[in-house]
Amino acid sequence: MSYQSDLFQSVATAEEAVIIEPMTEKTEYAAINYEYPLHERVRTYLRLEHLKQLLKPEQTVDATNYSRYFDALFAILELCERSDVRTDVQKDLDRRKAQLLVWAQHPDVNQQQVQELNTRVQEASKAIHSLTRIGSHLKQDRLLSVTRQRFGMPGGTCNFDVPQLHFWLHQAQQKRDDDCQRWWHEFEVLFNGLELELELLRGQAHFQWVVAEGGLLQESTEPLSLLRLRVPAKVPAYPVISGHKQRFSVRFLSCAPQQGKASFENNVEFELALCP
């Protein structure tokens, strides 16, 4: 079964063609999207992407949403402290540059598209290369250092616990916007590169319809980094995914278990993309 893009069938190998896959795909039915990383590096990327969606750096921060904002900000900071995300993204973008150089030699490839991707990758890689340790300046911020300690405590952000935060929330909105922009600037270059890498990673494979017979699908494959699933919303079950880079299984569990059985034993037809 092939999941790879056929956009450039005349290019020498499927592995070399797939990265130029269009990055957005639309469905004509109501679906729920799931992703499962098969590599620890990609797992960290997806967590950071999720945290940025919670952080919403483009939105203003005030007394109604500060808890969500700081929870996400401190989680991003902790992930960057625990792993060398900058180096991982740098290495991935360097690999993309090498791939693009190979594809540019094929006469049947879309040269304009390759060049546009190459420019984006070059710019992102250069920007990340000049970064120092991510988040180091935020550790020196007095408000963040005090607030971060309290966010780990249940209800620890009451005004009597963190008067500095309470005071900050009563400053002019422009003051808060400037501070938030300064804090986000610490991560912005990293996220630009990370999101580009995820865009290219996701664009390497087509979605194909598959069937989980009796609610179970198991496959052995070439090394993979990411599984992407699109499950019709009408299916009364959700997928539980496990595996490693060369073997995976998808088991569907019922959203409303009956007679003590959680497994969903009907056939499930859904879309699957395997991203190398």
Image (cartoon, rainbow, N blue to C red):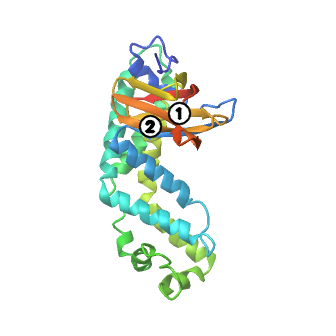
Front residue of this view, candidates 207 and 13: 207
Give the residue pinned by disc 2: 241
- Can you see residue 189? yes
Residue 177 figure quarter: bottom right
Quarter of the picture holding the C terminus: top left
Looking at the image, which residue is at 34% across and 51% down?
85
Do labels 1 and 2 touch, CB within 8 Å?
yes
The x, y position of residue 147, in whole percent, is 44, 77
The x, y position of residue 100, in whole percent, is 39, 28
Looking at the image, which residue is at 39% across and 45% down?
43
Q: Is residue 135 shown above or below 267? A: below
Q: Nearer the viewer, mark 1 or mark 2?
A: 2
- Can you see residue 24? no
The x, y position of residue 58, in whole percent, is 59, 60
Q: Is residue 275 shown above or below 139? A: above
Q: Secondary structure at mark 1?
A: strand
Q: How would you rate the neighbour count of disc 2 (Cα within 10 Å): few for under 14, some for 14-19, many for 20 or more? A: some
Give the residue pinned by disc 1: 229
Q: Secondary structure at mark 2?
A: strand
Per the rendering, the mark at residue 213 is none
Front residue of this view, candidates 233 and 268: 268
**Mark 2: which amino acid?**
Ile
- Sequence-earlier tag: 1 or 2: 1
**Mark 1: which amino acid?**
Leu
Residue 63 figure quarter: bottom right
Q: How would you rate the neighbour count of disc 1 (Cα within 10 Å): few for under 14, some for 14-19, many for 20 or more? A: many
**Marks 1 and 2, Cα distance to the nearest angstrom?**
10 Å
The x, y position of residue 86, in whole percent, is 33, 51
